[in-house]
Image (spheres, rainbow, N blue to C red):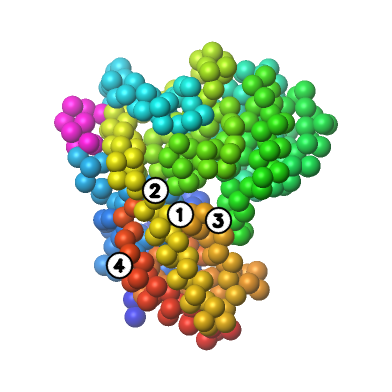
Amino acid sequence: MRLFTQSQKLWAEAQKLVPGGMPAHLSPQLLVRGQSPCFIERAEGCRFWDVDGHEYIDYMCAYGPMILGYNHPKVEAAVAAQKKKGDCFSLPSPLWVELAKRMVDLITAADWVTFGKNGTDVCNLAVRVARAHTGRSKILMAQGSYHGIGAWCTPIITGVTEEERLQVLSFPYNDPAALENLLKQHGPEVAAVIITPFKHETSHDQEMPTEAFISGLNTLTRPEGPLLILDDVRGGFRLDLRGSAEYIGLKPHLSCFSKAMGNGYPISALCGAKELMSSASKVFFTGSFFAGAEALAASLATLQEMVDSRSLEHIFRMGEMLKQGLLDQAASLGLKINYTGPVTIPFMTFEDDKKFEKSRAFCARAYQEGVFFHPYHNWFLSAAHQEEDIRETLLATQKAFEAVKEKA
Ligand SMILES: Cc1ncc(COP(=O)(O)O)c(C=O)c1O
């Protein structure tokens, strides 16, 4: 039996030194308390090793960034070459322009682009550009959607003033009539509608957007306002290399990317339509590390490899294989599961499991067997996952499903 002794020891120390031990999504408190690893020693390909020396096939991919896999040779070589020249300079490196060109060529909805470090940076920027461009204040977002930790949208409002939230209204995802009604009431004050390419709220089954919803979003928004912002921070490059807008038929005026675009190096991008370029140039957006050349090099190498190796097609194939395997196993044991969202970013819940007891039992057993899933958050696949890894995973999940069945 795997014990998590070092993990627990470090976690106890972290709680004495850091408020909450580890804030938000990386907190091991969100996994299966006492029965999950808490700290990672190293990672390679689609696997990591925890501080107790246990190996796992990873289906969280660092919550999305690792799209080619950990320590990818081409990305690491590009970063090492740049490291020799330097990273943080007094002026930008030429890679700033090279990556801008690459993104504008690749992303259908991009006539221009600017770079930050986190998804939050560019979601906040998108909202400011929309306000600057339209001269309006209100933002419409889908209930339960996550767009980072800006005061306007953070899901936990401790420390946020009421005034900062007054300009944000919400509507249910996949409800074009509710969106239309909100726009009827507040239309002339609405700067933008911000949306994710599919519904990926934590602890909920995922939902792809309906045709009616996409059509509503496209027809109810326009370049004069209300604008349409696609938050592609999580979905970006795991649905379509040209941006998820292509995959779902959306016509956004602004698109936010981060996570997968640098295969683990910190970088984000706001892309926009030409009509918004002048307004975007007037919004103050900067940071000491925004032009870091290593992350720019990582992103160029990541996007190149994704194109050259047709990595996304592979990730879809692996995603299908995992999905089919899990559905078959659950069915053969008479367990009812919901397997939702794109196969490259799937999520699995059990029916009649409102308190997630079955999910926790499933994950706890999977950790014992060397596979890392999250009980409440959607999962991610990478190009490093190969058929052998999926087969090995399925040996583990057979036991994990059996553990759930025994408990029921
Ligand atoms: C859809 C979406 N938007 C924005 C963010 C915020 O990105 P970051 O954590 O890089 O600030 C996330 C992060 O999970 C996300 O999933």
Measured from the top left, where is residue 130 in percent x and y? 62, 24
In three-dimensional space, the C-alpha distance between marks 2 and 3, rounded to whole angstroms, equals 16 Å
Between disc 2 and disc 3, the foreground one is: 2
Whole-angstrom CA distance, mark 1 to mark 3, is 8 Å
Tell me the residue that label 2 is attached to: 312
Disc number placed over residue 344 in the picture, else none: 1
Mark 1, other Cα within 10 Å: few <14 / some 14–19 / many ≥20: many
Beta carbon of the mark 2 residue lies under 8 A of ligand 1: no
Secondary structure of residue under mark 4: helix
The residue identified by callout 3 is 341
Magenta-highlighted residues? 78-87
Q: Main secondary structure of the magenta part?
A: helix
Q: Earlier in the sequence, mark 4 or mark 3?
A: 3
Q: Earlier in the sequence, mark 1 or mark 2?
A: 2
In percent of width and height, residue 48 lies at 30, 60
Mark 1 → mark 4, Cα distance in angstroms: 17 Å
For badge 4, the amino acid type reads: Glu
Residue drawn at (51%, 29%) of the image: 109
Q: Which residue is mark 4?
A: 388
Determine whether, in the image, residue 35 is placed left or right of residue 228.
left
Q: Which quadrant is the N terminus positioned in? A: bottom left
What is the three-letter code of the residue carrying label 2?
A: Leu
Question: Which quarter of the figure has residue 185?
Answer: top right
Q: Is residue 158 visible?
A: no
Asked whether the residues under the numbered discs 1 and 2 touch, taking CB atoms below 8 Å apart as contact, a structural biologist would say yes
